[in-house]
Image (cartoon, grey):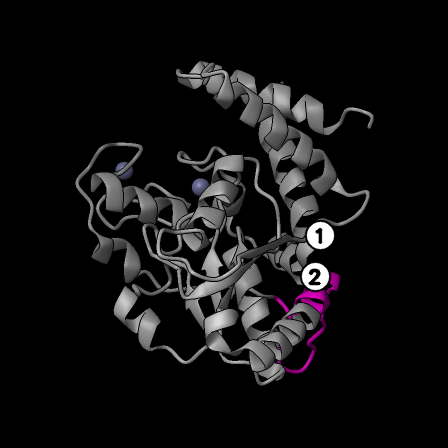
């Protein structure tokens, strides 16, 4: 398939459109060619591109941070890299519209605000022992930007854990925010989110593992409250098809037939792409 990269890119736009229209605008107007490149770690189009100063090989911010934590090496050239060389890269302005003057919500943002209001009411009735904090996951750090803004407008305090800062458990436990915004791919790897009892997954990733890990962080040992997990899926959209891809991946993983080589991975991705465009 010759147009593999552009198909991935278009799919990314469809997935982003399910979250918020501004995600698509921001990307379409960006002249940065890095954006349409493939990430060496997740094999998807790069989201929130960063590159280590040492070698300049780009990857998604969250993918690369997770990789550094694990291996301390660049995934492309194996150069030694550190958190500092990624963490200090300037964060470019990501939206082509002025969010302050031209703010608009989206179906998912509205749904989130409604759910958070209900959770807050429950919390008042049952106390913090009964209903914990809420963790909101997205695979797009730009979506977390927009959600942060929406919450700020609604006067809801939130704490971001998405690799743009280096948080620790102490800061988390001291925080008075009831809402935590977490990057699905890497935010707070190994972070124990027991203080939370509700998880809301704003979007759906190719890989069911990311979703499972996100849910596990709330379902940790030591969790004493009932856990509620919600996932937002737009009816009749690419997200419904992605659910099928996730199921197929899970079936393969369960059967321990996981693709091992790079070539196998590419082949598996092609099969997934065909599944995405298959009739329901
Ligand atoms: Zn990536
Ligand atoms: Zn490199």
Mark 1: give few (<14), some (14-19) or many (20+) Cα within 10 Å.
many
Of tags 2 and 1, the one toward the viewer is: 2
Kindly identify which residue carries mark 2: 108
Extreme bottom residue here? 155
Q: Which residues are magenta?
A: 96-112
Q: Could you say which quadrant of the image residue 105 lies in?
A: bottom right
Residue 98 visible from this viewpoint: no
User: Quadrant where the C terminus lies?
Assistant: top right
Percent position (x, y) of residue 18? 71, 52
172 and 167: which one is in front?
172
Percent position (x, y) of residue 32? 51, 51
What is the spatial separation of the Cα atoms under label 2 and label 1, in whole angstroms? 8 Å
| Marking on residue 48 | none
Kindly identify which residue carries mark 1: 18
Compared to residue 174, the image places residue 275 above or below, namely above
- The secondary element bearing badge 1 is classed as helix
- Give the residue displayed 66% in from the left and 66% down from the top: 112
């Amino acid at each position: 398939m010759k147009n593999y990269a552009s198909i991935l890119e278009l799919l990314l736009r469809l997935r982003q459109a399910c979250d918020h229209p501004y995600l698509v605008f921001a990307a379409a107007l960006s002249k940065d060619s890095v954006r349409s490149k493939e990430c060496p770690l997740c094999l998807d189009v790069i989201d929130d591109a960063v590159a280590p100063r040492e070698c300049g090989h780009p990857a998604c911010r969250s993918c690369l941070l997770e990789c550094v934590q694990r291996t301390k090496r660049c995934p492309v050239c194996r150069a030694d890299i550190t958190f500092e060389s990624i963490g200090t890269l300037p964060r470019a302005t990501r939206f082509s519209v002025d969010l302050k003057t031209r703010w608009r919500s989206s179906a998912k943002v509205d749904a989130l605000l409604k759910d958070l209001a209900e959770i807050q009411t429950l919390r008042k009735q049952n106390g913090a022992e009964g209903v914990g904090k809420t963790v909101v996951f997205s695979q797009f750090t730009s979506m977390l930007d927009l959600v942060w803004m929406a919450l700020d407008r609604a006067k809801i305090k939130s704490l971001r854990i998405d690799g743009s800062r280096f948080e620790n458990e102490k800061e988390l436990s001291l925080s008075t925010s009831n809402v935590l915004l977490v990057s699905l791919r890497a935010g707070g790897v190994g972070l124990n989110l027991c203080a939370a009892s509700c998880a809301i997954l704003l979007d759906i990733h190719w890989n069911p593992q990311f979703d499972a890990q996100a849910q596990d962080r709330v379902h940790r040992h030591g969790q004493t409250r009932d856990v509620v997990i919600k996932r937002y899926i737009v009816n009749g959209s690419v997200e419904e098809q992605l659910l099928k891809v996730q199921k197929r991946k899970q079936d393969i993983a369960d059967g321990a037939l996981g693709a091992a080589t790079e070539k196998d991975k590419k082949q598996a991705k092609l099969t997934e792409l065909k599944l995405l465009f298959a009739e329901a």
